[in-house]
Amino acid sequence: VQLQASGGGLVQPGGDLRLSCAASGSILSIVAMGWYRQAPGKQRESVASISNSGMITYADSAKGRFTLSRRHTDANSTIFLQMSSLKPEDTALYYCRVLTWRSEDYWGQGTQVTVSS
């Protein structure tokens, strides 16, 4: 599975950003996709994830502000993270992650989100 993440950037507090992560290759083996983030000096944490059945899980910090969605095509499976009402504490490097039924664990290259005035 190959991952291509995009959509990060600099935004003012209260603003919006949308992250995308496109998975290609053995997409039929995927059982879950999600977004994680890591702020400087902190551990990587889950933000939101979606299973094959479509069940979505959000971190408490993301509930009510972030929305995860997914789009399938024959060639790839893409997840989107719509982030609204962004706060400075949302500043982090955001990573896309994919898990497969073969217990493979793939991470995207990370996209920086900076929330600052």
Image (tube, rainbow, N blue to C red):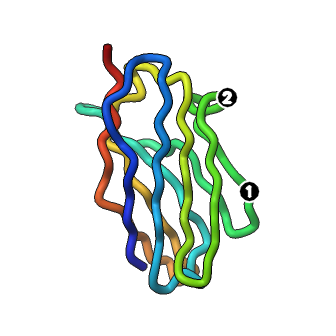
What is the quadrant of residue 94 in the picture? top left
Point out residue 90 in the picture as x, y percentages from the top left corner.
42, 28
Identified at 62% across, 77% down, the residue is: 73
What is the quadrant of residue 43 in the picture? top left
Residue position for label 2: 64
Three-letter amino acid code at the position of disc 2: Gly
Picture layout, residue 32 above or below residue 45: below
State which quarter of the image contains the C terminus: top left
Three-letter amino acid code at the position of disc 1: Met
Picture layout, residue 51 above or below residue 44: below
Nearest the eye: 22 or 107: 22
Identified at 32% across, 37% down, the residue is: 9
Q: Residues within 10 Å of mark 1 (few under 14, many from 20)?
A: few
The label number, if any, that marks residue 16 in the structure image: none
Nearest the eye: 77 or 89: 77
Q: Residues within 10 Å of mark 2 (few under 14, many from 20)?
A: few
Kindly report which numbered mark, 1 or 2, lies closer to the viewer in this rendering: 2
Identified at 49% across, 18% down, the residue is: 14
Point out residue 96 in the picture as x, y percentages from the top left corner.
43, 57
Q: Is residue 49 left or right of residue 90?
A: right
Is residue 64 at all visible to an observer of this figure?
A: yes
The kind of secondary structure element at disc 1 is loop
Residue found at the very far left of the displayed protein: 41
Is residue 44 at all visible to an observer of this figure?
A: no
State which quarter of the image contains the N terminus: bottom left
Identified at 48% across, 67% down, the residue is: 98
The kind of secondary structure element at disc 2 is loop
Point out residue 57 in the picture as x, y percentages from the top left corner.
66, 47
Query: N-terminal of the two: label 1 or label 2?
Result: 1
Residue position for label 1: 55
